[in-house]
């Protein structure tokens, strides 16, 4: 069966995704946008409504804008003018993005909106279905499921993607290593009523044994987080409201009248990363590929961006447009990104430890953050706006995310990001070059050729500054530039090489 005809039980699909969190749902949307049959498996019977992660950074907002769905997320959240690095404020710069500020939005709302988007695109989400086994062969993967049914259930797919969290069953069954560093602390988190919190409370306070914070979501309702160091709880021991209350009393000397918990969970500063993101026809994304201390709110964002990097590549391979080797670029590009996040969150965990020495370090570190270069560097770490993939393009933009410049086309005005709503590669010709159009003829069924004029003489590039507007760009579906030209005659052989690398062999000519 194909497309929307994929059946709920025992049917074949091009891709099976394990996990209906933000990463799995975003990946499913990307695949369906490209016309790929996809089934999402979720072990839970329904969405829990637990708030979990609490925000989205600039690059994720840009990704949603590139697909034309950002407005629904903005309507469900609230933009914040500042972020933080281990509790030290980081200022954001409007120069770097059309969406410079973090969006405070709960993971439960993100999942609801992505599930609605998936339903619009025809994604099937099969709940109460957990991966229990897998077998790979040359043609695909047989996925064994644990369900409420008495008889064993299997699905046959060409590829399986594990988006099933830090304890990923898919990762373990595929034999993919997960090296890293062990936890050194325990944090408890809960959404509670907190009627006695003082009006002059500052959102995070350091104490002798750790720190605690309270973030307001609605009048009287707060997210409370306590962090205590040099003690690691058994991860199989279910966290309780009483443990959260006791931890807050130890740190603050009071529970501020805490009551009516909506949700309680636990995390720590263990940091691990899959040693490879692909094992044959099995791939990993999101927390299944990397876990870390959730400082600066980077985890969910990185997972969504994993999905957007992988989705168009996997779709191209499934549809026979590109060779399987294209999938190797997923690990090559995203593994270093997660490695950097693990590195900076380890640093944030160290900066959060209690003690006079760390207090002094925080004071020195905070004094450095007033310098623009330092603030810009930390801002790049948190937002992922400064990521540059290792692409051969001979231009400052090659490998970077494309700035959302204003454009004028024969049909009127538009923006660069609006050209990516269909999730297809875009060859943007800003000079009306006959050479560029002729070079792209062999990829006309896969690449959208757009002639336009730039409204901006200079384009902003984080970590570089303003650059002269390019004359032509090959933009991948994930919004990263694969090839660019600026001034003089465009390098047509380099353009053809980039088209072949990222879009597969030409169909003709």
Image (cartoon, rainbow, N blue to C red):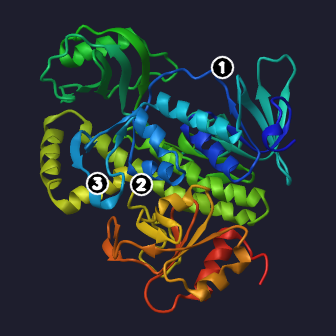
Q: Is residue 112 visible?
A: yes
Quadrant of the rendered image containing residue 204 = top left
Quadrant of the rendered image containing residue 244 = top left
In percent of width and height, residue 300 lies at 47, 40
- Up-down relation of residue 396 to residue 492 (above or below): above
Residue at x 56%, y 37% (from the top left corner): 114
Determine whether the residue tagged by mark 2 lies in a helix, strand or loop: helix
Determine whether the residue tagged by mark 3 lies in a helix, strand or loop: helix
Spatial CA span between label 3 and label 1: 40 Å
The quarter of the rendered structure image containing the C terminus is bottom right
| Outermost residue to the front | 411
Q: In the depicted view, which residue is nearer to us: 119 or 275? A: 119
Residues at circles 2 and 3 in contact by the CB criterion of under 8 Å:
no
Residue at x 74%, y 62% (from the top left corner): 324
Spatial CA span between label 1 and label 2: 35 Å
Q: Is residue 271 visible?
A: no
- Up-down relation of residue 498 to residue 58 (above or below): below
The residue that label 1 is drawn on is 45
> Which callout, 3 or 1, points at the residue further toward the start of the chain?
1
The residue that label 2 is drawn on is 340
The residue that label 3 is drawn on is 378
Spatial CA span between label 2 and label 3: 12 Å
Front of the two marks 2 and 3:
3
> Which callout, 1 or 2, points at the residue further toward the start of the chain?
1
The quarter of the rendered structure image containing the N terminus is top right
- Up-down relation of residue 466 to residue 239 (above or below): below
Front of the two marks 3 and 1:
1
């Amino acid at each position: 069966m194909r497309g929307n005809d994929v059946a709920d039980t025992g049917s074949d699909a091009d891709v099976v995704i394990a996990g209906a969190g933000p990463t799995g749902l975003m990946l499913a949307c990307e695949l369906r946008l490209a016309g790929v049959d996809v089934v999402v498996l979720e072990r839970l019977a329904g969405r829990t409504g637990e708030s979990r992660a609490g925000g989205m950074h600039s690059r994720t907002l840009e990704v949603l804008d590139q697909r034309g769905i950002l407005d629904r997320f903005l309507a469900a959240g609230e933009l914040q003018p500042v972020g933080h690095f281990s509790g030290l404020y980081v200022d954001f710069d409007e120069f770097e993005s059309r969406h410079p500020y973090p969006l405070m939005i709960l993971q439960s709302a993100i999942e609801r909106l992505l599930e609605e988007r998936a339903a619009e695109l025809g994604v099937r989400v099969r709940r109460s279905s957990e991966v229990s086994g897998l077998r790979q062969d040359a043609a695909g993967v047989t996925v064994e499921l644990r369900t409420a049914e008495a008889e064993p259930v299997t699905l046959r797919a060409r590829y399986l993607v594990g988006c099933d969290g830090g304890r990923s069953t898919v990762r373990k069954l595929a034999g993919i290593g997960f090296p890293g560093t062990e936890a050194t602390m325990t944090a408890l988190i809960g959404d509670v009523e907190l009627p006695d919190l003082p009006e002059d409370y500052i959102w995070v306070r350091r104490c002798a044994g750790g720190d605690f914070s309270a973030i307001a979501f609605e009048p009287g309702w707060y997210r409370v987080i306590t962090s205590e160091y040099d003690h690691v709880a058994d991860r199989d021991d279910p966290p309780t409201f009483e443990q959260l209350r006791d931890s807050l009393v130890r740190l603050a000397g009071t529970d501020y009248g805490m009551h009516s918990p909506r949700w309680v969970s636990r995390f720590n500063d263990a940091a691990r990363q899959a040693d490879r993101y692909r094992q044959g026809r099995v791939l990993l994304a999101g927390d299944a590929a990397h876990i870390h201390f959730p400082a600066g709110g980077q985890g969910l964002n990185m997972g969504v961006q994993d999905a957007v990097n992988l989705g168009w590549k996997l779709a191209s391979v499934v549809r026979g447009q590109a060779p399987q080797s294209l999938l190797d670029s997923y690990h090559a590009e995203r593994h270093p990104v997660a490695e950097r996040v693990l590195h900076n969150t380890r640093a944030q965990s160290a900066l959060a430890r209690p003690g006079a020495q760390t207090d002094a370090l925080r004071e020195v570190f905070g004094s450095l953050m007033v310098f623009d270069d330092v603030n810009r560097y930390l801002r790049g770490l948190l937002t992922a706006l400064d990521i540059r993939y290792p692409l051969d393009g001979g231009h400052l933009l090659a490998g970077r995310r494309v700035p959302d410049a204003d454009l004028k086309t024969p049909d009127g005005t538009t923006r660069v990001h609006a050209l990516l709503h269909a999730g297809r590669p875009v060859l943007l010709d800003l000079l009306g070059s006959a050479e560029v159009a002729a070079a792209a003829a062999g990829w006309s069924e896969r690449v959208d050729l757009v002639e336009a004029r730039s409204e901006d003489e200079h384009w902003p590039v984080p970590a570089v500054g303003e650059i002269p507007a390019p004359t032509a760009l090959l933009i991948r579906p994930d919004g990263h530039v694969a090839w660019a030209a600026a001034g003089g005659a465009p390098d047509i052989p380099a353009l053809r090489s980039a088209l072949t690398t990222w879009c597969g062999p030409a169909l003709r000519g």
